[in-house]
């Protein structure tokens, strides 16, 4: 017998699933299976032509499960940011989306004893500068080369966030969105930078400073305001006009 809810005239049918159905959860196979069922339900609805969206959330920040996730390498998602992401997803045609900001090399090394499965291949490589050591490394770096080290790190983060190398050449003048970054990726990039630099950044930082040089300038001014580069060191400031 076909469930009657399958034919309700709905604009949205959203399941708040879990990252556990995508990456597993040791000792909680029942939890992972229950969330995988929600994902399958959404795909069944979409196959029949009905609306449906499954979001495989990582932990949200605040009380509950999120408190234990940071030590495991996951970056809990602030609730206000999660709701903003939800609004964006409702305007897309996506059937299933995983939102799992994390230090992926750390997470994958804990999840898998050997090489991770192929689906995680693009996430297994660490950025150019290890995230746990970025801020101390920048503080120890002489001013003339600090910005270049930060730009190298930004390039590695963008490659990791987008799951591929989007740079057609060594030039840095293309905007992130010309390279193929979307709004969800820009939020993931901002989350990674917040953790790397131990600073709160605006959710629109990649929109306001949409190239590697512009974003590096902004971050240098924000993190090291007393050590601004002199004009003769070749740093441009301010947003693109």
Image: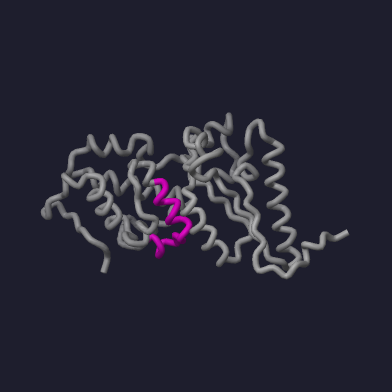
Which scheme is used to colour this image of the protein?
Answer: one colour
Give the residue at the far front of this rendering. 63
Q: In the displayed structure, does residue 124 sit left or right of residue 41? A: left
Q: Is residue 142 left or right of residue 57?
A: left
Check residue 185 for magenta coloring: yes
Q: Quadrant of residue 213?
A: bottom left
Question: Which residue is rendered at x = 47% and y = 36% of the image?
Answer: 70
- Residue at figure coordinates x 45%, y 62% from the top left: 180
How many numbered callouts? 0
Outermost residue on the right side: it is: 1
**In the picture, which quadrant includes the C terminus?**
bottom left
As drawn, 68 above or below 22: above
Residue 203 drawn in magenta: no
Foreground of the two, 96 or 31: 31
Residue 9: give x, y in percent of width and height.
73, 70
Write the residue at 63% across / 36% down.
25
- State which region is magenta: 176-192
Q: Position of residue 202 (x, y in %)?
A: 36, 54
Quadrant (top left/top right/bottom left/bottom right) for the N terminus: bottom right
Left/right placement of residue 139 relative to residue 1 reads left
Residue found 30% across the figure and 38% down from its top: 135
* 111 vs 63, nearest the viewer: 63
Residue 130 image point, x, y percent = 38, 37
């Amino acid at each position: 017998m076909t469930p009657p809810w399958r034919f309700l005239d709905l604009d949205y049918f959203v399941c708040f699933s879990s990252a556990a159905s995508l990456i597993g959860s040791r000792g909680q196979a029942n939890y992972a299976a229950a969330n995988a069922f929600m994902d399958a339900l959404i795909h069944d609805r979409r196959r029949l032509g009905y609306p449906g969206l499954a979001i495989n959330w990582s932990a949200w920040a605040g009380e509950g499960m999120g408190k234990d996730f940071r030590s495991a390498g996951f970056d809990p998602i602030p609730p206000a940011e999660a709701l903003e992401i939800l609004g964006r997803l409702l305007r897309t045609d996506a059937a299933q989306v995983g939102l799992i900001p994390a230090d992926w090399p750390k997470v994958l090394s804990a999840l898998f004893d050997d090489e991770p499965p192929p689906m995680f291949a693009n996430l297994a490589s660490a950025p150019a500068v290890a995230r746990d050591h970025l801020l101390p490394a920048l503080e120890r770096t002489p001013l003339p080369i600090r910005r270049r080290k930060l730009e190298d790190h930004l390039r590695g983060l963008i490659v990791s966030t987008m799951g591929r190398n989007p740079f057609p050449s060594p030039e840095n003048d293309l905007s992130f969105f010309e390279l193929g970054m979307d709004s969800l990726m820009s939020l993931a990039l901002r989350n990674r930078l917040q953790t790397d630099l131990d600073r709160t950044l605006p959710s629109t930082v990649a929109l306001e400073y949409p190239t590697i040089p512009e974003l590096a300038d902004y971050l240098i001014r924000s993190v090291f305001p007393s050590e601004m580069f002199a004009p003769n060191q070749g740093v441009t400031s301010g947003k693109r006009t």
